[in-house]
Image (cartoon, helix red, strand yellow):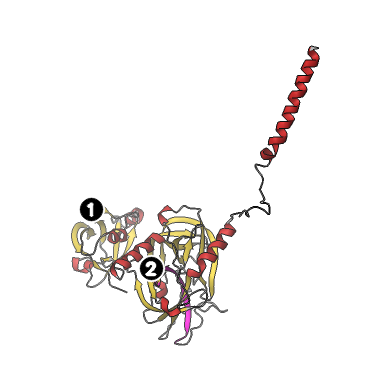
Amino acid sequence: MKKLILLIVLLVGLLLIISAVQQYAPSIFQSGQLHFASSNNQPVKIVTEESVTIDIVKKYGPSVVTVSGTATQSNSNSDQNSPFGFGFSPFFNANPGGPGNSQPDQNQEQAIGSGFIVTSDGLVVTNKHVVTDTTMKYTVTTSDGKKYSVKNIYRDPLNDVALIKIDPSQNTSEKLNPLTLGDSSNLQVGQYVIAIGTALGDLKNTVTTGVVSGLGRGITAGSPYEGSVEQLNNVIQTDAAINPGNSGGPLFNSSGQVIGVNTAVSQNGQNIGFAIPINVIKDSVQNFQKNGQIKRPFLGVSYSLMSPDVAAMNNLPQGAYVQDVQQGSPADQAGLQSGDVIVKVDGKQITDNNTLADVITKAKIGQTITLTIYRDNNTQDIQATLEAAPQQ
């Protein structure tokens, strides 16, 4: 009798276990699988790098523009030999034969770079080197072919940034949609990025993707043959392809925010491009909106930053080695000379992390600064009063 009761208990327990398995097993075994929505439910969107890119291009691509220039005089510049593709010559030949091999006739319009809309009333950001030729007549063209004559150009004296003003009323049927500017101080190496621009001056809204390859880079970019060499500090390195013509175009993060402005590409390596952090551009835009132009403090020297190793090799202190002093500038008035080494500004050492450009940028127009300089084996202090940088 006891055996029969035990057998019944075991059978009842087994039935309960089977019932529980039937009820809960489907959810257990399906937890690691993809769920496909039935026809009665809302569709499920699988988010991938591909879908992110497509969405950003569709939504924000129309706000990326092409900057063109019309020559008013003969120009034979070419940057094909420059160490960095710092934009490209205003007369880049996109046809077979390579850059700089042919020049268009005068008054022929040629696309020379990219830009993007930042305000609905017609403010466009691009690189200063894209619109550096003051003898040219510039035009902005949207991705759908609408053209706008450039009313004014405001060039940042300290950065490779220019603000172009166009008149939205030239095309009343089109609304200018500004892009959202992100925060470049929060960037991470490895972060996904998207570059859009007019590659080779002809291929509008060309899209390339990649990652942030490095941060805080310092490069010398430009063409020594055009006299447009410039030291760029704290730039973003990316492996997203930045071709000639992409200069001035936006570098997006995966949220569709602009986190950089495409600027240069190394011709001595593969997949090495550079972009100016968007926080620099935000500062330029705010400066313009406050003053009606971009006002920057100005000292008036060109210099090379010497590392401790270079300084030791030349028996000089670490600092900014003055290569040239602009005549009539605050530096000239203060008595600075070529060959001087600016060791400190207001008692703070000039280093890789605290460059002379960094110090001057943070100062104010009209401020008097104390420069500790090394000259003829002696250290001395001189004072200079900063002025507004000349408009370009």
With respect to residue 65, does 356 lie above or below?
Answer: above
What is the magenta range? 107-122
Q: What crowding class fits label 1: few (fewer than 14 Cα within 10 Å), some (14-19), or many (20 or more)?
A: few
- Relative image position of residue 49 (x, y in whole percent): 57, 57
Which amino acid lies under the numbered mark 1 shown in the image of this protein? Gly
Magenta span main SS: strand
Q: Secondary structure at mark 1?
A: loop
Between 30 and 140, which is closer to the camera in this rendering? 30
In the rendered image, which quarter is residue 381 located in? bottom left
Q: Which residue is mark 1?
A: 347
With respect to residue 107, does 363 lie above or below?
Answer: above
With respect to residue 102, does 222 lie above or below?
Answer: above
Q: Secondary structure at mark 2?
A: loop
Q: Is residue 333 visible?
A: yes
Which amino acid lies under the numbered mark 2 shown in the image of this protein? Val
Q: Which residue is mark 2?
A: 161
Q: Earlier in the sequence, mark 2 or mark 1?
A: 2
> Which labelled disc corresponds to residue 322?
none
Q: CA distance from mark 2 to mark 1?
A: 30 Å
In the rendered image, which quarter is residue 338 located in? bottom left
Q: Is residue 226 visible?
A: no
Side of 76 relative to 380 (left or right): right
| Quadrant containing the C terminus in the rendered view | bottom left
- Relative image position of residue 218 (x, y in whole percent): 40, 59
Q: Residue furthest front?
A: 40
Between 334 and 338, which is closer to the camera in this rendering? 334
- Relative image position of residue 37 (x, y in whole percent): 66, 51
Is residue 116 one of those drawn in magenta? Answer: yes
- Foreground mark, 2 or 1, reads 2
Q: Residue at x 35, y 71 (%)?
A: 155
Q: What crowding class fits label 2: few (fewer than 14 Cα within 10 Å), some (14-19), or many (20 or more)?
A: many
Side of 158 relative to 99 (left or right): left
